[in-house]
Image (cartoon, coloured by chain):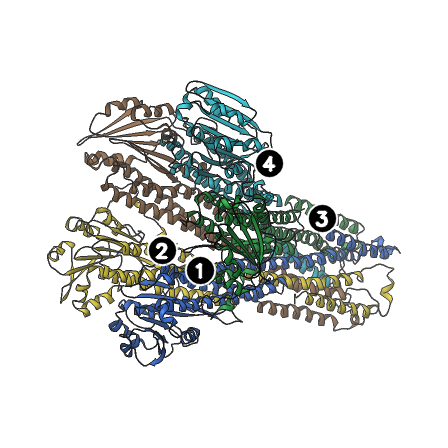
Chain colours: A yellow, B brown, C cyan, D green, E blue
Amino acid sequence: MPESLVNPSDKAGLPPGAIVHVGEVPQHETRIKVVDIGTGNVAENQLNSLHELAQYKDTDSITWVIVEGLRGANLVAELEPVFGIHPLVIEDILNTHQRAKFEEHEHYVFIVMKGLLSDKRQFHVRTEQVSLLLLDKFVFTFKERQDDLLQPILQRIKAGKGRFHSLGPDYLVYTVLDIIIDNLFLLVDTLDEQTNALEDKLLTSKTTQKTLRAIQGLKRELIHVRRNITPMREVLAGMMRSESTLISDKTGIYLRDALDHTIRIVESIESYRDILSSLLEIYVSTISNKMNEIMKVLTVFASIFIPLTFLTGIYGMNFQHMPELSWNWAYPALWVLFITIPVVLMIYFKKKRWL
Amino acid sequence: MPESLVNPSDKAGLPPGAIVHVGEVPQHETRIKVVDIGTGNVAENQLNSLHELAQYKDTDSITWVIVEGLRGANLVAELEPVFGIHPLVIEDILNTHQRAKFEEHEHYVFIVMKGLLSDKRQFHVRTEQVSLLLLDKFVFTFKERQDDLLQPILQRIKAGKGRFHSLGPDYLVYTVLDIIIDNLFLLVDTLDEQTNALEDKLLTSKTTQKTLRAIQGLKRELIHVRRNITPMREVLAGMMRSESTLISDKTGIYLRDALDHTIRIVESIESYRDILSSLLEIYVSTISNKMNEIMKVLTVFASIFIPLTFLTGIYGMNFQHMPELSWNWAYPALWVLFITIPVVLMIYFKKKRWL
Amino acid sequence: MPESLVNPSDKAGLPPGAIVHVGEVPQHETRIKVVDIGTGNVAENQLNSLHELAQYKDTDSITWVIVEGLRGANLVAELEPVFGIHPLVIEDILNTHQRAKFEEHEHYVFIVMKGLLSDKRQFHVRTEQVSLLLLDKFVFTFKERQDDLLQPILQRIKAGKGRFHSLGPDYLVYTVLDIIIDNLFLLVDTLDEQTNALEDKLLTSKTTQKTLRAIQGLKRELIHVRRNITPMREVLAGMMRSESTLISDKTGIYLRDALDHTIRIVESIESYRDILSSLLEIYVSTISNKMNEIMKVLTVFASIFIPLTFLTGIYGMNFQHMPELSWNWAYPALWVLFITIPVVLMIYFKKKRWL
Amino acid sequence: MPESLVNPSDKAGLPPGAIVHVGEVPQHETRIKVVDIGTGNVAENQLNSLHELAQYKDTDSITWVIVEGLRGANLVAELEPVFGIHPLVIEDILNTHQRAKFEEHEHYVFIVMKGLLSDKRQFHVRTEQVSLLLLDKFVFTFKERQDDLLQPILQRIKAGKGRFHSLGPDYLVYTVLDIIIDNLFLLVDTLDEQTNALEDKLLTSKTTQKTLRAIQGLKRELIHVRRNITPMREVLAGMMRSESTLISDKTGIYLRDALDHTIRIVESIESYRDILSSLLEIYVSTISNKMNEIMKVLTVFASIFIPLTFLTGIYGMNFQHMPELSWNWAYPALWVLFITIPVVLMIYFKKKRWL
Amino acid sequence: MPESLVNPSDKAGLPPGAIVHVGEVPQHETRIKVVDIGTGNVAENQLNSLHELAQYKDTDSITWVIVEGLRGANLVAELEPVFGIHPLVIEDILNTHQRAKFEEHEHYVFIVMKGLLSDKRQFHVRTEQVSLLLLDKFVFTFKERQDDLLQPILQRIKAGKGRFHSLGPDYLVYTVLDIIIDNLFLLVDTLDEQTNALEDKLLTSKTTQKTLRAIQGLKRELIHVRRNITPMREVLAGMMRSESTLISDKTGIYLRDALDHTIRIVESIESYRDILSSLLEIYVSTISNKMNEIMKVLTVFASIFIPLTFLTGIYGMNFQHMPELSWNWAYPALWVLFITIPVVLMIYFKKKRWL
């Protein structure tokens, strides 16, 4: 069962907006990183608490706050008083079973995306929810796990010095979305390899019950992947259409590009669905074909030898008056039959294309 | 047959708007509870008749009327003269075969939702219709059964003292919707467990006709669940879009959240549909595979012994002139054949991957 | 073949709007009934010709004309000069192969509905086209057959005295639609019983080719029913949206209710489609299962006795030098084999779950 | 392969708008007929060239030009200079692989329709493209073949004298569309007969591989028919919505009627698709059922006689010490077995419902 | 695996808009051709670098730049400073895994199309991305490969002298789109031949596992083709709707024509999908039919000879007291049985239509 099909019913009965981290992913300790992007310089810091963010509020720089690991739920709860984030939004950040979504609030924008990863050999997909808050001078990124996903962006920020400052916080948000979408292409690649491997196995007819399970497993992961990716299309389309002043026109063209990529991935996923159905059809008719072959062998054997055995039965009877028994050429004559009957049947089966 | 697929044709021929409770659910006695939420205090009362509600009409408090059990149809009929509820609305409250729906009327809003419950072990879904009326200072909740569904809300109201008064009656309506939706997550969880259990059974190949019935039973319940849940999406979207003054902007964000949850559940249900189809495909090809295996055994047995039996038949014949019969080494030679023929066939079948 | 799938190609080549009754239903003699609903009194009359309607034109009362049986095509043709009905509309009334539809004309509204009836035991659906014309003070109802469909309405009109006068002619139209829709619920009930009966048969495995035909027959009727019901949804939605002054706002709420019912029925029909597909799947895999069982029996019998027969064959041979034949314990020893071989095979098959 | 699935790739590389007749239909010689409809009189003429149309340009009458057979491509090319028809439109007239379409141009309207015919016995559909140009006082009809399709209209024009003049050229266009659509009903009738015949064959179980081919052939024609008919719906909807002054309001009601018919036909086609799928399902499970029956016979025969043959084998052995052989009642006792074993097995199979 | 299902994940981690050619197609050396279309004369030149285009910027002529082969990525990068093309657009030109798309930018229009080619014998589709930039006086065409695709246009330009100058650069863009779409018709033709060939093979019942693979291969290519062609429809619809001044109304009618063609192709592709599904159904039931035939032969042989062999077994037993053995007519009587039993069974099987 793909992990994210399991739903957070633990919450049933709690007041709406109750702030508890819900998710099966082994929870990582929270680590808070702050990247302060000024006009010319970039500073990176490790924080212990979101309270320390107050110092960044009055500066002119763009402050990128990366929160990895969501175990310290109360940490995040500090967002409401300082930045005026709605409790329901904070709930959505902590509950990692969200659909990808895009919400415009009065003074900030809230984005939920799903990062999908799979190891190369087995197509088993791991999901990570990445939530983004875009404020006037702040960008928050909340991740479930501590990993290197955002590393390339950090390096580019450091290398580009103040370039990211001029591009604005919405461009920063875009780069995060872009890296998530680029990773989806990796996923599609793995999917491609898996499907090809399966197809090769099917064509070399080393088909076993295992192949069926592999196809079904892939199919199931695909259902899961599709459910997570499809809403991303709406997210990006929503951002493009958005009239929020937080998203500048200049970034719009990048979002269109990201949207194009997402559509491409969604269409790939749909194609693989069709291809997997084809594989299943091949599998099923391979089984039928095998059955046919087995039946042919059985039929050929039985049809040839059963009549012959009947013949031997006749002359194995013990009647006193069986004149043939004493004829000298009877036995050799029977051997002629023993040879011609199979030959005739073989020709018949050959004509029926059974051999 | 899921109960709600049966339709209330008993009414055919009656005047439209005839007020009779229609529904197969064993009808409970009506119990009326009133929760009066003032600015600072909360009072809970038990009423005998809706007539007694008149006293609450002039107060400033928010009055929540919970009607559990719909047998006392005439009770409900008292709504029309006092609160000006349209007879068709009252009919819809009593006829528990409604689709979830949202209707705006002049001075009130009418909402029908479906509560879905299933016991943990078997995925057999019980449906309860929960109707809501939102007036200026009143909220009515009509339930088919007497149970604890709304208990958590009552507790929160009592604990929060006047907080619910300031949040308004529309927020109260939202909390009821929210608790219904949260219960749907429980349903999805049960569904998840059932599907997993079935899949495990299929993979350990202890597949019987029973497994098929379990898959089909689940599928059928899913059809039923889907039909009930899908319209809820429209209900919440309708409420969000509504321009009624009874639903404040502040509550809008909560409704969006509830809508997100509903969409998530609908998508889960769709996923489980796909997964159940996959299970069925596994089941069907498991049967085919089994057949193949059976056929192989039969073919191997028959193909090996039928030719041998023919051989023994030959030398069981009673011809007077069968020179082989008197040869000393003929019998041992035949034994050589009896051993080599099966060996050769075994190798052949091995190569064909039948063994 | 459901009757209404047959189309009126007899008309091909005739001028558009040629007024001929087209339909396979055995045509009934036309019977014209007039119900004149005044402010306080209700008068019911039988007419011979529509010409006699002239007398009702100048009164203030609402005149309901019920035409049952469409054989007297020329009768209906009298509508054009007197009431200004477009020839194409009259053609649609007479041609009983219409889809349900709603058309607004300058001074009248035209509605086509399909009444669907089925006998309880067999789900064989009979279709009747009911056309309605709503004018300022007139309501026309055209039915294919003479039956009791509208009887309950007539009774209510008589009982209610002038009540129907104040509700207006559009409410009268609604009551006719309502009774047609209520009858659809009866249809759904029969469908439900039929499906349940089929399912029971399938589960008790008394499956025969007949069951398949029953499923397919039901499926086919469902295709027919669905095609007839689906457009009714558009009819009611169209009436609700209509800005014609002939349909008052007050009636709007009743139409919404009727629309809700229609949607509910359409969704039921869709559910039954899914359920029938499920039944077919059960049927198909029941057959496969049966085949498996048959094959098992064959395989068990053949696999056990074929080797044993081979053994008997050996010692039935007539070689002069077969030392075993003279051994005293050879025969009993063979009996040991005759018993152990089946036992071993039985255990093997037991382990393979074939027994 | 339905003819129209083949596409005119011969044109690849030519300049867009190159005027060449493309189509596999054996091309007929062009025949030009002119029907001049004045206020009181109707004149019918045969033309040699479209140049001769100049004389009709200044009259007040409605001129209907019927061009049958498109081989004389240059003839048609005379339309551009005289009537100002765009080269691409002329290309579309000559290329008979168009979809049905409706195009509004500055001073004329262009309509492409597909006439579909099938012979009664075999459901093999022949397609003919009928293009229409509607100008202020002119109507052009281009047909691929010379046949009687438009004959009924001609007769009505002649009979009606000047009636068609007052109805306007757009009504003339409608009558052509109407006759094409009426012919589609004939097609649906043939389809209905074919499907019924197939169903009867399936139910009387005289199912052969031929039946499958018939189903598939019908299915394929249906794909073809559907592809041609579906766009006609858009054509008529487009004409109804059109704000061109060439199409009067008065004709609008006739177009709505034609649209209703088209929708009805499209829905019929969809129904037949569903029904054909059902037939295929019946076919497939009929085969499975037959297989079951065959297997049962085999199993019954084999299961009864194989054990008996084994018994005879035992007492056919030649051991010297087989005491039973000399018992007097041994042989009759064996006969008892020969009779009881089959009886017991028969009862067993009876209970399993195999007999 | 169709090439284009593989996705450019190599780029993951690079900054968005990183300009690298991504694509598996063996990259051709870049060749730049310039066609300068003046009012009366046409000049064709070969360029080494896009820098040399500067000279064409001030002339009044329409300049068509054809870039074939995208290996020289830096060449293309020269577009940004000179013509103000956005880096993301240049990235899209170089990354040949785009969907077909149409983008309006401030002073230019960007179009991506997919050219699809297949060799006649095998339906193996090769994809080439053709990107177009339409500026005020410039048209850029970027192709992956050096081939003759655009040759016919070049010839027409040269032949038409200044005609293309007056038609404008948007018409030039249209001609390129038109030639790509015309090539799609070739593709559909090949598809048609392949499908017909497959169908013929299926009907002559020379069905092998190879046929299945051919069907599946075709199906898979179709998935690929469909994915590439479907977005072209949006491209052309987008261009028609576009309000850019770069696309004149005069060209609009040509675009509508191209759109019609594209829709026609998309619908063909859909039809072939349906037809391939039908072929698969024929294939599957052909296998089942074959199985039935095999089983019949086996059953007939076994059912006839097994009882007979049992009879011979009886009189092969060695009991001392078997009176029949000494009867003179016993042996001939048995022969009567040996003949009548098969005859009776044959008649029975004949009645069951097994022979």
Task: Give the residue number, with chain letter if any, for mark 1.
Answer: D84
Residues marked 4 and 3, same chain = no
Residues marked 2 and 4, same chain = no
Image mark for residue D342: 3
Marks 2/4 in contact by CB < 8 Å: the verdict is no
The percent coordinates of residue D115 (x first, y second) are 55, 53
Considering only vertical position in the picture, is C188 above or below D230?
Answer: above
Q: Chain of mark 1?
A: D
Q: Quadrant of residue A218?
A: bottom left
> How busy is the neighbourhood of tag 3: few (under 14 within 10 Å), some, or many (20 plus)?
some
Q: Whole-Å distance between the Cαs marked 4 and 1?
A: 52 Å
Q: Whole-Å distance between the Cαs marked 3 and 2?
A: 64 Å
Q: Chain of mark 3?
A: D
Image mark for residue A230: 2
Q: Classify mark 3: helix, strand or loop.
A: helix
In depth, the one of D156 and B185 nearer the eye is D156
Q: Amino acid at mark 2?
A: Thr
Q: Amino acid at mark 1?
A: Gly
Q: Where does the N terminus of chain D fall, quadrant-wise?
A: bottom right
Residues marked 4 and 1, same chain = no
In this view, the mark in front (4 or 1): 1
> How busy is the neighbourhood of tag 4: few (under 14 within 10 Å), some, or many (20 plus)?
some
Q: Amino acid at mark 3?
A: Pro
Task: Give the residue number, with chain letter if any, for mark 4.
Answer: C25
